[in-house]
């Protein structure tokens, strides 16, 4: 290629480009001297990587030579950071962020409170702030059976990876579906090594807070042979790892406005009072197994390879906690002397509930787990028909399964008071000797509730692809690529339904269902329980809560054939207190395995693409790139049910309660659509070091499978009260609601994507890059409320407010990525081993809700307009609409900063990763409820308790974590690695948005963890 002098403009542009891609790459025991695998669709030469420092240079060169805007991670930087999963590896890439909670949104694979639980390994990968991320394995579709379309990256062993590519604006030849980006996980092939290759590593890790050691093992064998029938190669790679961690949590209930909350205060000043709290300790155990094998063959113009990949993930958690709060926030009272912040929010004080028997408390014993298994087998063949024509074929079969459970038993009781210190972060509850004695007294507790959840899912896909490439004999046209792809994908999920949460004994059951409570002080109900303490709570950063009595964890042991075995025993306690025979509250296990709990879908796609690659060398600055179009047709079908179960209304008097016929209507849906997706990628080379890129494309992301469920439940919500003297139950209110788990008529979310980048490469792996981008989205899926009318048994119609997903919003996400990477080779002696890798991402977003005219209030409650305003814009506990929300999961600022050292046998990393706050959900469990107090002057319910159905937007707080790794090579074969994560003992915080500001919702602490690994290669 013609060489060009560096002009003043080029120099100025290079100086403007401030940072470069410094991706630090993931774990694999074998990759010390592996070659970087050639991209399936790239004509770039294989880059030989020898040693660990060369890994960063290899990643930079992969980015430089790519046809598209891409950031790459190569496996030779293995062991540099204690990234325990592919998810944690990805957070080091510029523009990529991860969540820190189990914010699983599939309603059939959880009970909906994942946002309240810390994720030991991180979850929820976002690229440029958006979660529309496609996942691939070696350029093929890859997914988990999680109700979505992508892999759960935390399920994938990083030890099996040869590299990871993150495509920011994919071209037409890439499989459609990733608006925000495409993550391609690459594995090695036998021909990637010059001959025989073997490696093994053993590892031990330990969580400081949990205090338990965990082993790990990985190994690889590969070889190639020349025979009269061509070259053959075989490779096998295995990995097994385990972690045991603990996370402590403290959460605060929403603040509710009051003017009469402090005893003796008659000023009428509005105060905002949090009426409850929850503290918890969660033990997390995970085993992950990986197996990968490859057979490869080549002879003359024909080559082929067969791969098999399997990832198994087995996770179990045990959680113990205590919840305290007032049953009715509108009547709770603070002792004199309470203090408040300038915004009126409670800081310190003692809260009582004079209209009830005391402050409600609930101790919980919970166990949850999940087993996931993904298997992928693929056969690829290349035929070089002529010097100009290459034909490729690809067949793939993927099968992913998962099973999960989530069981809980709650003990309940009361305390006379609750003493807050909300001025601290995390907040603390203070207990005197009398409180502590009550918490250890069996007379305080009775059996209250249980929760039973099970689910199982199977996802399968068969895919076939045929591609061709014609190489031009032209100074301008490089090649023409075109092809077709066909898929047939099925997704089936079954889950418990109808009664996952059930009462054992509750105040509202008194009189008409049971008389009295099954207190532990009664010998009939005294077992099985245990005392649970909270030692070293938050690593000693805050006062430990007192020990409490909880249900024996063995009660939650999962049962593959039904509810946990102990549930019949504890629900039988309530039967002994029943007022009728048969018992009105007779317990039955939650239904599972029937058709009504089935989400069944099938999707078929047909895609065709054509892409032209060009290179113009005659311009003052050479220009190359590609232009293409992809057309895809999607046909989907779903089967589901419309369900209604009539509650028992026989004991209610004082009002007319309509009765409806039970519903279990099976419904079938079909939906089809076609998308045309053009793309253009252009690169201009100023010289060998400096280049500029521009890219434009249209993208689409299909709805996740859980969003396409044809499964709607209608509910008649009856609020009643029982006179304990007369045992008469009186109707207070009725609301008619519904929940649509999905919408099979949803369309894909679409986007127009525009990218510009400037890249400057220098020295050995040094680089400075700047990228700016803009994505305009439409048909964003959000939750909205619609009306479903159903007649009661007399023929009178009633409107049910059904909330479900719809294509109801548009938006924009734009920003910039800056990155810098360099080793300081010119420094003298040992100093020349130092280097820096840094990147920064700025994001700005706007969400346009195609909603009804703006409402200032979401009250009176339970109207379609009020529910829509609540679901889209958030609703405060006083009934005021919040609004002004960004897109979910998008942090405005994020950065990674790493100090590198590579010299001789020593290699070390000290890395800090940080992201600013981000919206997790608008209407999430724990920050929504119905106990708000309406302040709307035009509402008939003004000032009443339980008059607002509020939903406070939940934010993940700004979070940074410092990690370190040290590796020493004894020789070319043997190395030792020592790693540490979260050296700063960072606390992850959540916030809830209210009109008084972002208030701390909760905090999670998991502490430091360490690992030691010994690796041997030959």
Image: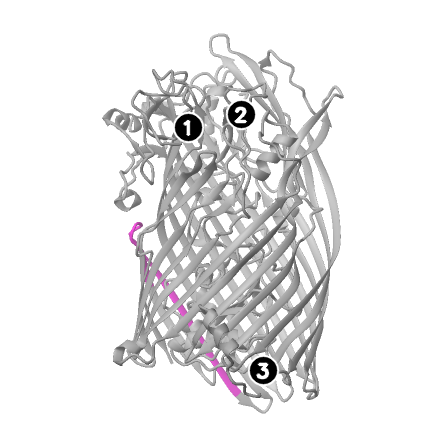
Q: Residue at x 59, y 24 (%)?
A: 860
Q: Nearer the viewer, residue 201 or 685?
A: 685
**Which of marks 3 and 2 precedes in the sequence?**
3
Taking the image as shown, residue 494 lies to the left or right of residue 89, namely right
Judging by the rendered image, the residue that carries numbered circle 2 is 586
Which quadrant would the N terminus be assigned to in this image? bottom right
Determine contact: label 1, label 2, CB under 8 Å: no
The question of residue 684 being in magenta is answered with: no
Q: Residues within 10 Å of mark 2 (few under 14, many from 20)?
A: some
Label annotation for residue 297: 3
**What coloring was used for the rendering?**
one colour
Q: Residue 359's quadrant in the figure? A: top left
Nearest-to-viewer mark from 2 and 3: 3
Q: Position of residue 956 (x, y in %)?
A: 45, 46
Outermost residue on the left side: it is 433
Reading the image, the residue beneath label 1 is: 272
Q: Quarter holding the C terminus?
A: bottom left
Magenta highlight on residue 218: yes
Relative to 298, is 138 above or below?
Answer: above
Residue 808 position within the rendered picture, expressed as x and y whole percent measured from the top left: 66, 44
Q: Where is residue 658 drawn, in percent x and y?
A: 67, 19
Span highlighted in magenta in the image = 204-225
SS label for mark 2: loop
Residue 297, horizontal then vertical, whole percent? 58, 82
Q: Which mark is residue 99?
A: none
Is residue 25 visible in this depiction of the protein? no
Q: Earlier in the sequence, mark 1 or mark 3?
A: 1
Determine the secondary structure under disc 1: strand
Residue depth check, mark 1 versus mark 3: number of the one nearer the observer = 1
For this orientation, the residue located farthest to the front is 8
């Amino acid at each position: 290629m013609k060489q060009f002098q560096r002009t003043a403009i080029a120099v100025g542009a290079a100086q403007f480009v401030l940072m470069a891609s410094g991706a630090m790459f993931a774990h694999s025991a074998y990759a010390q001297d592996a070659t970087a695998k050639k991209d399936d669709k790239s004509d770039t030469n294989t880059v030989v990587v020898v040693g660990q420092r060369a890994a960063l240079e290899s990643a930079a060169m992969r980015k430089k030579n790519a046809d598209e805007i891409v950031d790459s991670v190569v496996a030779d930087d293995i062991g540099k950071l204690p990234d325990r999963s592919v998810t944690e590896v990805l957070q080091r890439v510029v523009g990529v962020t991860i969540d820190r909670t189990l914010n699983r949104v599939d309603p059939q694979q959880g009970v909906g409170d994942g946002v309240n639980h810390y994720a030991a390994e991180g979850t929820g990968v976002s690229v440029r702030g958006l979660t529309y991320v496609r996942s691939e394995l070696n350029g093929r579709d890859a997914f988990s059976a999680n109700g979505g379309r992508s892999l759960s990256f935390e399920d994938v062993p990083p030890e099996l990876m040869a590299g990871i590519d993150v495509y920011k604006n994919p071209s037409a030849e890439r499989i459609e579906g990733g608006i925000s980006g495409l993550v391609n996980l690459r594995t090695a092939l036998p021909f990637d090594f010059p001959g025989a290759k073997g490696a093994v590593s053993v590892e031990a890790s330990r969580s400081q807070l949990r205090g338990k050691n965990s082993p790990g093992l990985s190994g690889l064998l590969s070889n190639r042979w020349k025979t009269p029938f061509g070259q053959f190669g075989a490779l096998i790679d295995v990995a097994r790892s385990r972690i045991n961690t603990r996370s402590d949590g403290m959460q605060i209930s929403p603040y509710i406005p009051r003017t009469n909350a402090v005893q003796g205060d008659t000023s009428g000043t509005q105060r905002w009072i949090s009426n409850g709290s929850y503290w918890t300790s969660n033990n997390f155990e995970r085993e992950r197994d990986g197996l990968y094998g490859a057979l490869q063959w080549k002879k003359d113009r024909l080559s082929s390879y067969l791969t098999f990949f399997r990832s198994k993930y087995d996770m179990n958690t045990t959680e113990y906690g205590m919840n305290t709060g007032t049953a009715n926030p509108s009547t709770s009272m603070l002792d004199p002397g309470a203090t408040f912040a300038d915004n009126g929010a409670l800081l310190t004080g003692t809260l009582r509930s004079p209209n009830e028997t005391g402050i409600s408390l609930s101790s919980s014993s919970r166990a949850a787990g999940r087993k996931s298994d993904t298997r992928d087998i693929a056969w690829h063949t290349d035929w070089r028909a002529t010097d100009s024509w290459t034909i490729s074929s690809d067949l793939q079969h993927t099968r992913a399964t998962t099973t999960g459970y989530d069981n809980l038993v709650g003990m309940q009781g009361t305390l006379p008071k609750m003493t807050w210190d909300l001025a601290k972060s995390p907040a603390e509850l203070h207990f005197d000797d009398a409180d502590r004695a009550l918490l250890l007294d069996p007379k305080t507790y009775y059996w209250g509730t249980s929760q039973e959840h099970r689910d199982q899912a199977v996802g399968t896909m068969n895919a076939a692809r045929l591609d061709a490439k014609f190489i031009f004999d032209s100074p301008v046209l490089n090649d023409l690529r075109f092809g077709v792809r066909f898929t047939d994908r099925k997704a089936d999920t079954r889950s418990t339904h109808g009664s996952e949460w059930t009462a054992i004994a509750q105040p509202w059951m008194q009189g008409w269902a049971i008389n009295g409570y099954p207190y532990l002080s009664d010998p009939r109900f005294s077992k099985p329980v245990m005392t649970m303490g909270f030692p070293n709570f938050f690593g000693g950063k805050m006062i430990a809560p007192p020990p409490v009595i909880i249900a024996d964890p063995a009660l939650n042991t999962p049962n593959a054939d039904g509810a946990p075995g102990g549930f019949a025993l504890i629900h039988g306690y309530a039967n002994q207190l029943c007022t009728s025979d048969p018992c009105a509250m007779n317990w039955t296990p939650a239904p599972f395995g029937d058709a009504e709990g089935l989400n069944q879908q099938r999707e078929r796609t047909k895609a065709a693409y054509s892409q032209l690659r060009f290179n113009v060398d005659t311009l003052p600055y050479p220009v190359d790139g590609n232009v293409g179009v992809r057309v895809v047709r999607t046909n989907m079908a779903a089967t589901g049910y419309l369900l209604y179960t009539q509650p028992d209304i026989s004991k209610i008097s004082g009002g007319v309660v309509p009765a409806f016929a039970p519903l279990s209507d099976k419904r079938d849906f079909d939906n089809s659509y076609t998308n045309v997706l053009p793309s253009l990628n252009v690169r201009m080379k100023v010289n060998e070091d400096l280049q500029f890129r521009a890219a434009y494309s249209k993208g689409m992301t299909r709805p996740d499978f859980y969003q396409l469920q044809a499964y709607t439940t209608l509910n008649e919500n009856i609020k009643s009260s029982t006179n304990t003297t007369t045992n008469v139950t009186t109707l207070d209110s009725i609301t008619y609601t519904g929940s649509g788990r999905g919408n099979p008529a949803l369309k894909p979310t679409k986007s127009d994507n525009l990218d510009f980048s400037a890249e400057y490469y220098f020295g050995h792996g040094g680089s400075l890059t700047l990228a700016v981008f803009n994505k305009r989205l439409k048909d964003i899926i959000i939750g909205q409320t619609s009306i479903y009318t159903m007649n009661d048994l007399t023929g009178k119609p009633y409107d049910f407010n059904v909330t479900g997903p719809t294509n109801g919003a548009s938006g924009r996400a734009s920003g910039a990525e800056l990155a810098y990477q360099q080793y300081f080779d010119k420094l003298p002696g040992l100093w020349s081993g130092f280097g820096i890798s840094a990147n920064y991402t700025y994001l700005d977003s706007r969400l346009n809700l195609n909603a009804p005219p703006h409402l200032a209030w979401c009250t009176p409650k339970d109207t379609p307009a009020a529910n829509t305003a609540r679901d889209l814009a958030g609703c405060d506990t006083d009934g005021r609409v919040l609004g002004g929300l960004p897109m979910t999961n998008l942090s405005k600022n994020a950065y990674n900063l790493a100090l590198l050292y590579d010299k001789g046998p020593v290699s070390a990393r000290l890395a800090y990763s940080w992201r600013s706050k981000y919206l997790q959900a608008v209407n999430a469990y724990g920050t929504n409820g119905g106990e708000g107090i309406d302040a709307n002057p035009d509402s008939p319910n003004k000032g009443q308790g339980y008059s607002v159905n509020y939903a406070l937007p939940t934010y993940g707080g700004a979070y940074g974590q410092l990690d370190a790794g040290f590796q020493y090579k004894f020789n070319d074969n043997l190395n030792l690695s020592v790693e540490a994560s979260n050296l700063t003992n960072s606390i992850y915080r959540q916030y809830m948005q209210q009109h008084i500001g972002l208030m701390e919702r909760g905090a999670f602490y998991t502490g430091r963890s360490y690992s030691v690994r010994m690796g041997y290669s030959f």
